[in-house]
């Protein structure tokens, strides 16, 4: 499944809640929380941090699924197509290197593999923690887009959705490169995460 199907899964899960999503700044704050959890597990695996006795640490796959879920909530709350923005950004940079638009019938694995195969020169010689630093920068850029919207609205220029969509897509592209390095099946992790939320029955999950 491509992101359209993932966004539909999120929408169908959250539609029972009123209101359905949190405001953008709240979702951004939740994204930073999830990025912190992803940073923690990567730092344990590749950095100097050591797991504490009796500490329960999720897998990289689980933390990536939380990040993707949060991004889908943000995109859905503004009716943005993540697929559209990924294809636009990848076409801009990699059309001459063989990038091909994907459709709704693609899997996350095939999208991941195409992104990873292109070997972005910016990423090529970086290790996992360096890619993580880039991912955290992308997340900060997204928060900046959301924060700066108030300036656009004050100036009567609400050109918000394109930079927001681009910022979301940049996070996804970087994370897919990291997923390629780790050979992670994000599709299965995402579906498992939705099932977990449904079983938990927690209404306080990324709402508007």
Image (cartoon, helix red, strand yellow):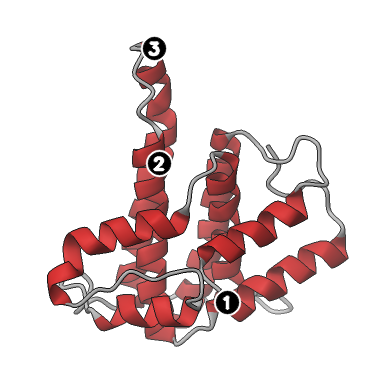
* 14 sits left or right of 22 in the view: right
Residue 95: image quadrant is bottom left
Residue situated furthest bottom in the rendering: 183
Residue designated by label 2: 164
Residue 190: image quadrant is bottom right
User: Residues at badges 3 and 1 in contact (C-beta under 8 Å)?
Assistant: no
Residue designated by label 1: 187
* 119 sits left or right of 23 in the view: left
Crowding near the residue tagged with mark 2, few <14, some 14–19, many ≥20 C-alpha atoms within 10 Å: many
Q: Give the image location of residue 54, x and y in percent.
A: 74, 78
Q: Secondary structure at mark 3?
A: helix
In front: 54, or 11? 11
Residue found 54% across the figure and 69% down from its top: 64
Give the answer, above or below, for where 63 lies relative to 182: above
User: Residues at badges 3 and 2 in contact (C-beta under 8 Å)?
Assistant: no
Residue found 34% across the figure and 40% down from its top: 163
Which numbered disc, 3 or 1, marks the residue that appears first in the sequence?
Answer: 3
Residue designated by label 3: 154
Q: Give the image location of residue 52, x and y in percent.
A: 64, 75
């Amino acid at each position: 499944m491509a992101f359209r199907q993932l966004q539909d899964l999120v929408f169908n899960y959250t539609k029972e809640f009123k209101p359905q999503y949190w405001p953008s700044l709240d979702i951004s704050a939740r994204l930073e929380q999830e990025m912190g959890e992803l940073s923690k597990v990567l730092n344990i695996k590749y950095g100097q941090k050591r797991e504490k006795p009796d500490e329960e640490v999720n897998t990289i796959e689980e933390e990536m699924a939380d990040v993707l879920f949060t991004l889908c909530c943000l995109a859905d709350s503004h009716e943005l197509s993540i697929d559209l923005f990924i294809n636009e950004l990848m076409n801009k940079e990699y059309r001459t290197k063989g990038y091909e638009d994907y459709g709704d019938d693609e899997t996350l694995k095939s999208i991941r593999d195409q992104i990873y195969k292109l070997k972005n020169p910016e990423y090529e010689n970086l290790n996992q923690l360096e890619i993580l630093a880039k991912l955290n920068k992308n997340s900060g850029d997204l928060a900046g887009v959301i924060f700066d919207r108030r300036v656009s609205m004050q100036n009567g220029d609400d050109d918000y959705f394109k930079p927001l969509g681009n910022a979301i897509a940049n996070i996804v592209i970087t994370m897919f490169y990291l997923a390629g390095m780790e050979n992670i099946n994000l599709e299965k992790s995402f579906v498992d995460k939705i099932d977990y939320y449904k079983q938990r029955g927690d209404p306080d999950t990324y709402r508007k």
